[in-house]
């Protein structure tokens, strides 16, 4: 095998593709690559590449320079350098000519233009007159033209904003009169954010862009998703989603900022990294003293500040302030808003200026802003700002009062996360503020405040923090504490412990709460303590206790006419008693509970009712009705500001699960991506169905993402999701040992004394059995009877576990349609492991999944087809295989498609479409892919537009080529046009 040709690169075009990837710049790369193609064909072009500092101009030009060199072009780069007022004339061109002079191929061209030797320092210095300058310009133009005639040339000029006057003049000459008639491309980059109104490059750019052969390319900030991809690519170790989100938020689309912030993730300081701060402050330090003073004041106000507030805080005459603001706007450090406000162009610039303040200066300015905001009379709206400014100015008593005011405002508008943050700030300030100041205007004690913070944390999805705060409230209780308050603390703690699956401890605390207050006389505290205790008792298997306490408490709640407590207890009884939430009676009770909760205004209880209504429908196979309740529930949670609380998180997961089951995978992936942007740490599991989709589409990194869910404190749902993905992934890898290991470890982690076999056990057993049956079948074929026997024994153990689980749920009744379908698959896999494929068993499994699970039904149909082939029923096998292939194509399930195609080849199944019929067999998804193929999209771009992986897109493209009988993408598009499968896209007209 011959060695690959080393690319010809002349000058500085470093290959850093293994250091920093090019992310989110596909369109720009395609555009510049097109310019290169035209240049090689003799149509010279120049592109002015604009963008803020750090946005990725150099990386983009490095990448396109590498492509140019790989295609045989000569690539030379000249750099402009910031030398202040001492600029060296022609510096970038001197660098370029020096590189060309060192290349033997161009010695004749250099000899033909001796005047350029002046720039190389080897020629005689001619008179500095107009004629001498013109001869120099013509000599450089002639040299570059001769070089381009020898080999196609890419000329790169970087950092044009620092170019000296002579270099600007030479560039104007070259582009206007000189070289754009040869095999040449010129790419020149400059910082758009450096071009203040009087910058000398501005008039040149305005002049050049009017030339027919010159175009402008603006690099805008990267999308958040691209910054996240960049960060994860740069960091080899796994990064927490919260860390990535924080970097993305602060970088605001700037690749360099993202890299610097990533590099600083291990440092203790949460501010701007010192190297990045130095870069950000350079432009600030070029301002006048007055303008710097204004920006320092603005930085204390925050990212955005109103003009009048800034004027009062800075204390400058109006004319001086306007002059300073005009300077800052001209230097593009500030941006003017339409509402008489100013904002820092980038948040990190504001952080750097703020960090540069002296401590005393910072405290003084914060105090000034706090007093000005207090004087404005917008109490509720400005409470959070005032709390911040008072705290930073060390006026802690006022900071505490403002924090509590801000928490009240956040509660009124349904902003649980903000309420939680303000209450935590108040708790931090509490010990530093005197008793007199604490009591002034607060009206609460520390225990009550801590309980409120715990509730806000739970509503915001910070479940473990809610537990921690409730424990703090318990520790704060004195010996003589009011018994009702002591009970409230304990049942609040018990409820929080239930949400993090600490069931035994929850039962212990709910028992204590109920014992601390008498049932008679009836009290609201006793009712809620009893309601919590009923739930806790149920979770630890004390079903009789749960029912008895719930029924007694419901009578008391009705007597007291506490409608939200009635609703909560009705929900418990509907779930615990009789046919549970799947039965008609249970559903009727749940709807009554929903109405009671709604009338009382208790959104949290209403959400619990809606979740159980949705779950009851899902468990009974009524998927359409399930979607109805989920839509209502999530809409209610959104209006109440409770989308991150426990039941809405469960509903998010269930919504994605239903979309997955129904085969609406692209919707599932899109919804999961939207959810991921706003989920709290405790909600990572909710995107689980999107991981099921990714795995089914051949993305094995889904297993790594699932494994990451197991990090941190134990989470029941996260463990369930991870177990499903990791068990299935092992099966797809044909690794029975790993499949069984993950299945067993997941069941063990999810089980407890009350529920030794969680409901998901039947699904996990069926997934593990698939890998076990594959292993047993393979060993039988090789004659290894002992090995096959070992796997048969394992299969029998697993199917018995599945049978026991499907037969008895928590309330002792059999599982619903989903559980019975998984049991049917487990039975069929067990028979396959013990004696070989059985058509009747697989037919039952196909029928069982007919309740709505599109993918699992197709997987069973594949096994059914295999069993039909083994039984000699070939025509039926052909029909099943065709149905499986169609489903696999529609879902983008590449591994399933590969498996069914392998069966067709292995079984020599007839009835596959003839060449003339292939065109008619394009699926809807393949037609979408074909349309994008005709637009020139790459596999990755097709995947992004259709929300599928690049690998899945590649499978679709291969299928299209096969069906059309084409050998290339271009030929496939041509055939499609000829057969009328696609029509040309209408062109835009003026």
Image (cartoon, rainbow, N blue to C red):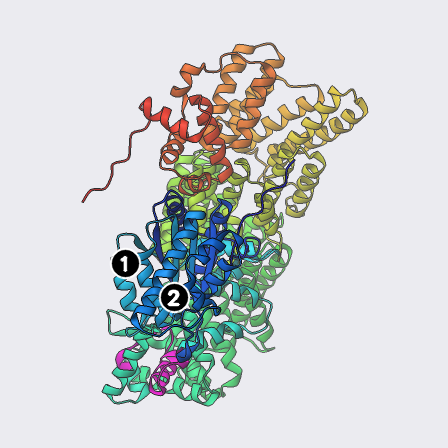
Query: Residue 263, position in %: x, y?
Result: 56, 65
Give the class, few, some or many, for how many residues have Cα within 10 Å of label 2's Cα (few <14, many ≥20): many
Identify which residue is drawn at 59% across, 77% down: 478
Left or right of residue 545, residue 189 in this image: left
First-in-chain label (1 vs 2):
2
From the image, which quarter does the N terminus lie in?
Answer: top right
Q: Which residue is mark 1?
A: 209
| Magenta-colored stretch includes residue 549 | no
Give the class, few, some or many, for how many residues have Cα within 10 Å of label 1's Cα (few <14, many ≥20): some
Q: In the displayed orientation, state which residue is furthest to the left.
A: 990
Query: Residue 973, position in %: x, y?
Result: 38, 29
Name the secondary structure under disc 2: helix
Left or right of residue 37, residue 6 in this image: right
Q: Which residue is mark 2?
A: 160
Label for residue 6? none
Can you say whether 845 is above or below 327 in the image?
A: above
Answer with the quarter of the image where residue 252 lies: bottom left
Answer with the quarter of the image where residue 985 lies: top left
Q: Nearer the viewer, residue 515 or 84?
A: 84
Magenta highlight: main SS: helix
- Region of the chain picked out in magenta, as a range: 284-309
Q: Nearer the viewer, residue 48 or 168?
A: 168
Identify which residue is drawn at 41% across, 55% down: 558
Is residue 70 visible in the rendered image? The answer is yes
Name the secondary structure under disc 1: loop
Q: In the displayed orientation, state which residue is furthest to the right.
A: 786
Is residue 523 visible in the rendered image? The answer is no
């Amino acid at each position: 095998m011959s060695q690959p040709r080393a690319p010809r690169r002349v000058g500085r075009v470093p290959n850093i593709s293994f250091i920093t990837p090019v992310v989110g710049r596909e369109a720009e790369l395609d555009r510049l690559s097109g310019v290169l193609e035209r240049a090689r064909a003799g149509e010279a072009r120049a592109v002015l590449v604009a963008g803020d500092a750090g946005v990725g101009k150099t990386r983009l030009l490095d990448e396109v320079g590498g492509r140019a060199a790989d295609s045989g072009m000569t690539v030379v780069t000249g750099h402009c350098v910031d030398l202040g007022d001492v600029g060296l004339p022609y510096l970038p061109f001197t660098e370029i000519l020096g590189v060309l002079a060192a290349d033997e191929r161009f010695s004749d061209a250099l000899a033909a233009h001796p005047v350029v030797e002046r720039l190389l320092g080897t020629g005689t210095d001619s008179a500095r007159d107009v004629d001498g300058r013109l001869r120099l310009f013509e000599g450089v133009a002639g040299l570059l033209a001769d070089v381009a005639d020898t080999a196609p040339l890419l000329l790169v000029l970087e950092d044009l904003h620092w170019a000296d006057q002579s270099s600007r003049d030479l560039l104007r000459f070259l582009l206007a009169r000189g070289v754009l008639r040869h095999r040449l491309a010129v790419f020149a980059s400059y910082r758009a954010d450096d071009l203040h109104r009087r910058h000398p490059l501005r008039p040149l750019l305005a002049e050049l862009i009017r030339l027919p052969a010159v175009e402008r390319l603006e690099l805008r900030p990267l999308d958040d998703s691209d910054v996240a991809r960049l960060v994860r690519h740069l960091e080899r170790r796994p990064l927490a989603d919260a860390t990535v989100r924080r970097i993305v938020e602060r970088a605001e689309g700037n690749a360099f900022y993202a890299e610097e912030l990533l590099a600083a993730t291990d440092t203790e300081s949460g501010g701007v990294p010192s190297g990045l701060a130095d870069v950000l402050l350079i432009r600030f330090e070029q301002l006048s003293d007055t303008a710097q003073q204004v920006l320092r004041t603005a930085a204390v106000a925050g990212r955005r500040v109103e003009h009048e507030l800034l004027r009062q805080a800075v204390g400058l005459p109006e004319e001086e302030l306007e002059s300073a603001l005009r300077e800052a706007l001209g230097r593009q450090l500030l941006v003017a808003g339409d509402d008489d406000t100013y904002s820092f162009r980038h948040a990190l610039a504001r952080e750097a200026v703020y960090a540069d303040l002296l401590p005393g200066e910072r405290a003084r300015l914060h105090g000034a802003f706090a007093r000005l905001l207090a004087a404005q009379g917008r109490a509720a709206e400005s409470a959070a700002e005032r709390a911040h400014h008072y705290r930073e100015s060390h006026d802690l008593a006022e900071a505490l009062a403002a924090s509590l005011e801000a928490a009240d405002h956040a509660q009124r508008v349904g902003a649980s996360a903000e309420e939680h943050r303000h209450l935590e700030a108040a708790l931090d300030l509490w010990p530093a503020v005197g008793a007199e100041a604490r009591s002034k205007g607060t009206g609460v004690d520390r225990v009550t405040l801590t309980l409120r913070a715990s509730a806000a944390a739970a509503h915001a999805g910070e479940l473990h923090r809610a537990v921690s705060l409730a424990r703090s409230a318990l520790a704060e209780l004195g010996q003589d504490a009011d018994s009702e308050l002591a009970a409230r603390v304990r049942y609040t703690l018990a409820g929080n412990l239930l949400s993090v699956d600490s069931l035994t401890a929850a039962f212990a605390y709910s028992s204590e709460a109920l014992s601390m207050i008498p049932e008679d006389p009836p009290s609201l505290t006793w009712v809620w303590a009893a309601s919590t205790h009923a739930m806790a008792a149920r979770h630890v298997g004390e079903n009789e206790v749960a029912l008895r306490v719930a029924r007694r408490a419901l009578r008391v709640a009705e007597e007291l006419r506490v409608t939200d407590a009635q609703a909560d207890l009705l929900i418990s009884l509907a779930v615990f008693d009789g046919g549970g939430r799947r039965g008609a009676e249970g559903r009727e009770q749940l709807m009554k509970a929903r109405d009671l909760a709604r009338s009382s205004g208790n959104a949290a209880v209403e959400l619990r009712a809606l979740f159980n209504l949705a779950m009851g429908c899902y468990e009974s196979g009524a998927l359409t009705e399930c979607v109805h309740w989920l839509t209502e529930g999530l809409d209610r949670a959104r209006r109440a500001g409770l989308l991150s609380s426990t039941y809405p998180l469960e509903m998010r997961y269930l919504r994605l699960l239903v979309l997955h089951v129904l085969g609406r995978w692209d919707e599932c992936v899109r919804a999961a991506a939207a959810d991921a942007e706003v989920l709290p740490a405790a909600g990572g599991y909710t995107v689980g169905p999107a991981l099921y989709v990714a795995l089914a589409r051949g993305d094995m990194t889904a297993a790594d993402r699932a494994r990451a869910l197991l990090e941190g404190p134990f989470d029941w749902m996260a463990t369930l999701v991870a177990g499903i993905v990791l068990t299935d992934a092992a099966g797809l890898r044909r690794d029975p040992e790993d499949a069984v290991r993950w299945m067993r470890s997941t069941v063990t982690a999810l089980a407890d004394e009350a529920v030794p076999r969680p409901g998901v056990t039947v699904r996990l057993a069926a997934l593990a059995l698939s890998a076990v049956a594959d292993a047993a079948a393979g060993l039988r074929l090789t004659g290894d009877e002992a090995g096959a026997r070992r796997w048969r024994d394992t299969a029998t153990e697993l199917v018995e576990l599945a049978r026991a689980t499907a037969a008895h749920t928590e309330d002792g009744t059999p599982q619903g349609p989903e559980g019975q379908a998984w049991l049917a698959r487990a039975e069929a896999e067990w028979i396959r492991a013990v004696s070989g494929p059985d058509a009747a068993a697989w037919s039952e499994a196909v029928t069982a999944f007919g309740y709505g699970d599109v993918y699992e039904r197709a997987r069973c149909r594949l096994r059914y087809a295999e069993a039909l082939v083994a039984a000699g029923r070939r025509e039926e096998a052909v029909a099943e295989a065709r149905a499986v292939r169609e489903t696999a194509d529609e879902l983008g399930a590449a591994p399933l498609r590969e498996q069914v195609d392998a069966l067709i080849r292995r079984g020599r199944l007839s009835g596959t479409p003839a060449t003339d019929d292939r065109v008619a067999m394009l699926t809807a998804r393949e037609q979408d892919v074909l349309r994008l193929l005709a637009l020139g999209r790459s596999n990755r771009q097709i995947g992004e537009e259709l929300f599928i992986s690049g690998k899945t897109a590649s499978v679709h493209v291969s299928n299209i080529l096969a069906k059309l009988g084409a050998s290339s993408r271009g030929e496939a598009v041509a055939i499609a046009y000829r057969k009328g499968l696609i029509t040309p896209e209408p062109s835009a007209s003026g």
